[in-house]
Image (cartoon, grey):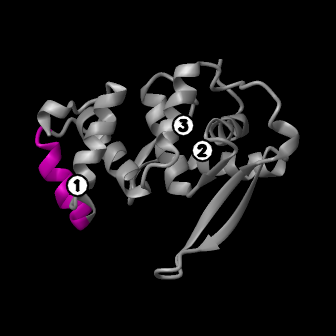
Amino acid sequence: MTPEPERVVADIVAAAGGRLVSRIRLQKIAYLLDQLGAKSGFRYVYHYYGPYSRDLDAAVFDAEAFGLVEERYDRRKLDGARYSIFELKADVGAQEFSYLSDARLQDVVKRLAPVNATVLELAATAHWLAASEKVKDWKAEIIRRKGSKASEGRLTEAIQLLAEMGLPPCAAQA
């Protein structure tokens, strides 16, 4: 049975400790959870920041409308770019998980929530290239698509994350 989309958002924020920063982070965590068998029901396409779901974007608005989460915005000090901060509403915090009832998946969210959003973007993109697009030289392709984002150890960290989760491409290919 497919969960209600707005509950998926609330459950991810709850598993992250009640607070999750960045829409990109939310998108990539949801994508990776689905690759681990979470079955959100969201469809993904490749977009600027890797796998992206319009369904999940819509679910964020519904989660806020139903009073499950609150989305507020802040700006980075470095360049003034705006980002989202999702917080679980206090009255839903005590409810049991409906979507992430598997403790293993809750642990994945806890592990991924503080990870740099660019590293998550690279991890999701590497998986997408290897598993969905079946790109044989996924490493060269991710460097071509992501440029400097794939430098400074971020791609290595992304591949290590995927290896920890048991998702392709495996660390031995990195």
* Mark drawn on residue 55: 2
Percent from the top left, x then y, of residue 59? 68, 45
Question: Is residue 15 within the magenta segment?
Answer: no
Provide the secondary structure element on which disc 1 rests: loop
Which residue is the extreme one toward the right?
91
Q: Earlier in the sequence, mark 2 or mark 3?
A: 2
* Residues shaded magenta: 136-148
The amino acid type of the residue labelled 1 equals Gly
The answer to whether mark 3 and mark 1 are in CB contact below 8 A is no
The residue indicated by pointer 1 is 153
Percent from the top left, x then y, of residue 47? 40, 55
Dot 3: within a 10 Å radius of its alpha carbon, few (fewer than 14), some, or many (20 or more) residues? some
Above or below, 33 against 51 in this view is above
Instruction: Report how far apart the C-alphas of labels 3 and 1 lie in the structure.
Output: 22 Å
The residue indicated by pointer 3 is 110
> Residue at image x 17%, y 40%?
135
Q: Using the rendered image of the protein, determine whether residue 43 is visible from the camera's viewpoint.
A: no
The answer to whether mark 2 and mark 3 are in CB contact below 8 A is no
Instruction: Report how far apart the C-alphas of labels 1 and 2 lie in the structure.
Output: 32 Å
